[in-house]
Amino acid sequence: MSGIWGFPGFFAVLVLTGAALRMAWIWPVGGMTHADEATVGLMAGHILLGEFPVFYWGQTYLGSLEAFLIAPISWFTANSPWLVKIVPMALSGVLVWAVYQLGTRVGDPGVGRLAAALTLVAPVFLIVWGNTARGGYVETLILGTLFLAVFLAAGREGRPSVRLTRFVVLGFVGGLGWWTNFLFVDYLIPAGILGLTNRWRDGRGLGFAACGFIVGALPFLGYNLATGGGSFAAGKLASTMRMDFGLPDVWMVLDSARRLVVDQLPPMWGVPPFDIPTGYHLDGVSLPVGMAALLILLNAGSLGFVFILAAAAFFRKGREWAGSSDGALVLGLLIFSVLLVFTLTPFRRYAASGAGIETERYLLPLYSAFPVCTALVVTALRRRVRLLAGAVFFLAISANAYVNVANVMAVWSPRGSAVPWQTWDLSGVRDYFAAHGIKECYADYWLSTRLSFESGESVICSQPFDYGGFPVRYEGHLREVRNSSHPAVIVDRGSAASFAETLGAAGIGYTRSHSFGQYVVFHGLRETVARGEFVPPAEWRGLTATHNSVQLGNMTDGNLGTRWGSGRPQRPGMEIALELPPGREIAGADLLVGGYVQDFPRGVAIHVSPDGIRWETIVRARNVFPFVGWSEGRFVFGREGGVQLRFQPRSARYVRIENLGHHGTYDWSIAELRIFGPKRVRPESVGRT
């Protein structure tokens, strides 16, 4: 294969092909962002304002290295959506260099060049994830690949001063990688295992490496020292690093391993179906007969070849077929550690559930090994059958290029199979906001950070609270929206009717926009029925329930930490009833859920009667959109609430609060029930004359 590298334009052609493929994936959605990308872009902008986020906003893991790398560029480009795509794409070039370094140390410069070429024209999954700023994935690949290259170089270095320098660099890269992404543990495991062998067992060198690690991981270590291990006490990092060895889970682990081989690895080699963060939902274009088998055989065969080399090196029986024995061990241990961590940690639950969209991202460290493994196979073949080696190399490059082009066409073509996913065009929403003077709004995770970033923060948008596994990304944005006197709310079109019905039942008026794709804007929120005077429970004559009457006192004890619960999944017909003094009027009720946020009634109605016989329904919401209301002169949207109901005053001696909704799992719970009478009109004071 050495002859082709002497051809002046060969590597240039590969570089241009790799750049063209990456740009082709970016171009259709270049003016739009994914919510995760928008978060990184916002972080970069706030870094320029003097902030120092240690982690990805809203989390205690995933370091902010990516945002710091983007920040200097954002000084010139402001909040351009292209920013969070072009910078990771440029970093993909650094990854090519890092793979070359690892390949050279595992084998020789020829292996390094082949591995670099296979990283330039890479499988779809690597190219797309290399283009996206979603928490430092491409940076983790770069740092991990360099970490293993430096690890091998340090073990072979005979000059004491240079050896110590490499140990310092090794530690620094390792610390930086650990802060950047917890997936870096996949690289630390093989280094830790081989570090016990004679070649790396150097007390002084390990001490220098430890110092370098502390410097590289300083943000992570500083945060955890200040918070008492905050990264491990809660959140995804804590659950991820918990290994599951219990016997009851053995079959689940085995099933996860099966799914790993059948469902996760083939998409990483470009074999559909797969879900990738292109900005479109893309199942993958069908491949020609034999190409899928070729990709699987080539990659699986390369992994098997490296495992044989690693095993031979371990037992000290192998010849130097291709690559050094310690290099083969490093690759073999890396592959083993990635599969082990994926299978024995909660990552496997995503795979086992069959619902793990983009689950393959947790296997991304394998891309440090895949191209080097294939390069070793090609090099071994070249020493025996040069023509076959060339054929294997060009088939691998061609197959990767074909799969990328075919799937890019599905995105670009008007008749393609791809549909927009999580990157809908928000220009119409931004124009509507500008026309109506809207500066703050509530929206879900997928829109809130995007709207803030793509508008250059001329509009501040935030989730109202943590939900669905997505935390509020930036508390500063949430404070601004909560303090706004006129916030808007963007809801999914499918929830718009429920939201409108709930606002009406809560005594809140609104203006509703037309649909923007699958979203609707509610704005001009205003109180139409004012909250009246609180009717203390001491005035109530009785309180009963159709279900679980034992805990009724919890609704009136003034403690949001206690609750009345129905004791079974909620369904229509469940009721709370109370009696008030004769002549009492009511004009509202609050059903607060406290910490039991899933137990709000999915539908609710209030019925009143003067005698317990003749009943009138005074308010009804068949589909409740929870946690919205009006308080202290402004619209509120937060989990500290529940369901707010407001209506014109009615004389009511007997009151029934009925659940109209279904839920297969959650009870109907009330932490506090508050009843309100009419608003008291205070007489104007009259001065003496």
Image (cartoon, rainbow, N blue to C red):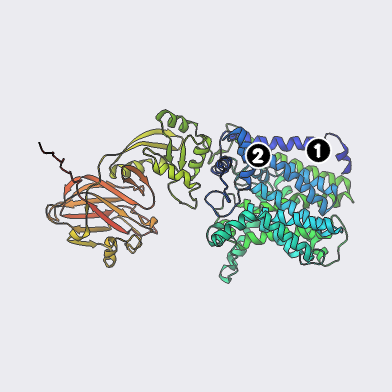
Residue identifier under label 2: 87
Q: Position of residue 628 (x, y in %)?
A: 35, 46
Is residue 199 shown to the viewer in this render? yes
Left or right, residue 636 beside residue 174:
left
Residue farthest along the bottom direction in this orientation: 247
User: Quadrant location of the C terminus?
Assistant: top left
**x 69%, y 50%: residue:** 141
Q: Give the amino acid at mark 1.
A: Phe
Residue farthest along the top direction in this orientation: 435
Q: Quadrant of residue 258?
A: bottom right
Q: Tell me: residue 258, above or below residue 247.
A: above
**x 58%, y 60%: residue:** 225
Residue identifier under label 1: 11
Q: Tell me: residue 69, above or below residue 667.
A: above
Tags 2 and 1 in contact by the CB under 8 Å rule?
no
Q: Position of residue 251 (x, y in %)?
A: 59, 66
Is residue 285 shown to the viewer in this render? no
In depth, the one of 535 and 512 nearer the eye is 535
Q: Position of residue 168 (x, y in %)?
A: 75, 56
In depth, the one of 238 and 609 nearer the eye is 238
Tell me how many marks there are. 2
Give the mark toward the camera: 2 or 1: 2
Left or right, residue 611 beside residue 25:
left
Residue farthest along the left direction in this orientation: 689
Q: Give the amino acid at mark 2.
A: Val
Closer to the chain start, of discs 2 and 1, is: 1
Helix or strand or loop: what does disc 2 sit on? helix
Q: Quadrant of residue 345?
A: bottom right
